[in-house]
Image (spheres, grey):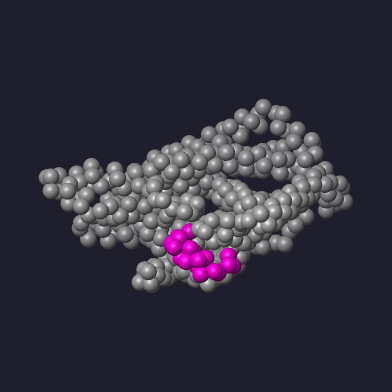
Amino acid sequence: MDAVIENLPVFLEGFKNTLGLLVFSGIGALVLGVIVAALRISPIASFRAFATVYTELVRNTPLTLVLFFCAYILPYLQFSPGYFLLALIGLTVYTSPFVAEALRSGINGVPVGQAEAARSVGLTFGQSLSFVIMPQAVRMVIPPLINVFIALTKNTSVAGAFFVFELFQASRQVVNDRGDEVIAILLAVAFFYLIITVTLGQIAARVEKKVAVLR
Amino acid sequence: MSSVLYDAPGPKARARSRVISVVGVIIILAGLTWLILALGAPKPSANGAIQPGMWDPTRWDALLDVEVWRTLGRGALATLTMAGVAAFFALILGVLFSFLRSADHAAIRVPTTIVLEFVRGMPVLLMMLFILLVFSTGSFWAGVAALSVYNGAIIGEALRAGINSLPRGQREAGLAIGLTPIATRFRIEFPQAFRQMLPIIIAQLVVLLKDTSLAFIVGYEELLRSGLYTMTNFFGQRYQFSFFLIVLAIYLAMNLSLSWLARVIARRSGPKAGKLVDPAPEPMPNAAGAGGGF
């Protein structure tokens, strides 16, 4: 146990970086995901096709490969803003198609009658999306979106293997120093991850309960 | 949905949308061409020497070596072996978890719930490291064990959601004709839940296949390690990008074919609702609890 207490600053440093990765790549993935989802449902066929291909390619690539590209190939191409930013880019790109799919399934989850009603009272594409579909879709989208962020939290650990000092890397360093207390150290790190994931899970459950009342 | 959101386009709108479509294709193609050219352009390196572009033959000639393909094959086989073994155990654990989680006795149900929540909230990578260091199993079994437990937990939750979504009459009918509660689970409820959740289970197996690449971090010689790190160390930095593209292609081939299989099965066994929308991605069971599965 004293290995954990002694190294608390190291863990907190890692925790800070994990949170940073989560928040910034979460925001980035949200922005990119909204764009991809919009392309995916747009009336223009070539945009739809592009968004579909992007989603399929990125979703079927392992995160390790995406991060490898960011950490090794991008600097080789004279683009090196530091490993933290590179990992941020990788996590953003990797998470964006999952966000887009969550959004799209939310939009598809709104009953068709709603869209038909909006159209039949004369609203345009933009109006029916922003006044009728989106307000309903957003509610349905929040729980799966939070799931995406929970997964993102866990995925930030992979960045540890690509030169970012986050929780997983912190645990590896402390384990190297104190091989005698491996179990306590790793459980402490698991505890830090659970702080984030369990909180997010609780929020998702609460939101889902509220949405269920609305419908 | 998208089809109802706008009118069936008239001749003017069709012409306009065709123009935008063509412009869109041109923009996308221009972007790709720029990317390919930018990668192919020779670059001055830090010490002033000119490096050849990424498509230069000197970056690809290592591929003529048979040993390269043998190593790649070994790596792919190692990845598939780990995925196969882990998928086998994940399915068994998934069934087991779903039974324990929906047990009648709180003494079984509550601890299982806590363990499942714990497992799903932890990164697979941390679990691999834990098993590797605490049980000193070697990297292969560390990877297999962590992937099995993690994906087993998610498959178990999917199966439980499937069992819960069945009409109550199914269980009651089973009990009424004199089957024991366990036999009802196994012979009445479980086959239906499994068939219903098959698309989600296969989607999870794609995730498992992708996640085997995490095992390289704990030192397992799979496709990523043997294809990228070992080869780049052997042939030199110059070939890194080439090997990256090849490893990427192999992963995409494996994952896309499994995803395609998942979609075929989803179409065969999925609900045949007469929807006006293009098919939504598979519904997540118990959205708040699923904990995300990628």
Task: Please provide percent x and percent y for residue A201.
Answer: 42, 66
The answer to if B109 sits in the magenta stretch is no
Q: Visible in this render: residue A76?
A: no
Task: Please provide percent x and percent y for residue B186.
Answer: 24, 44
Give the vertical position of A189 relative to B41 (above or below). Answer: below
The answer to which image quadrant residue B141 occupies is top left
The answer to if A122 sits in the magenta stretch is yes
Task: Please provide percent x and percent y for residue B74.
Answer: 57, 33
What kind of secondary structure does the magenta stretch mostly adopt?
A: helix
At 41% across and 51% down in the image, what residue appears?
Answer: B274
At 23% across and 42% down in the image, what residue appears?
Answer: B187
Check the image and name the residue furthest to the front: B11
Q: Which residues are magenta?
A: A108-126
Which of B117 and A190 lies nearest the eye of the viewer?
B117
Give the vertical position of B172 relative to A121 (above or below). Answer: above
Image position of B17 (left or right of A1): right
Which of B239 and A172 lies nearest the eye of the viewer?
B239
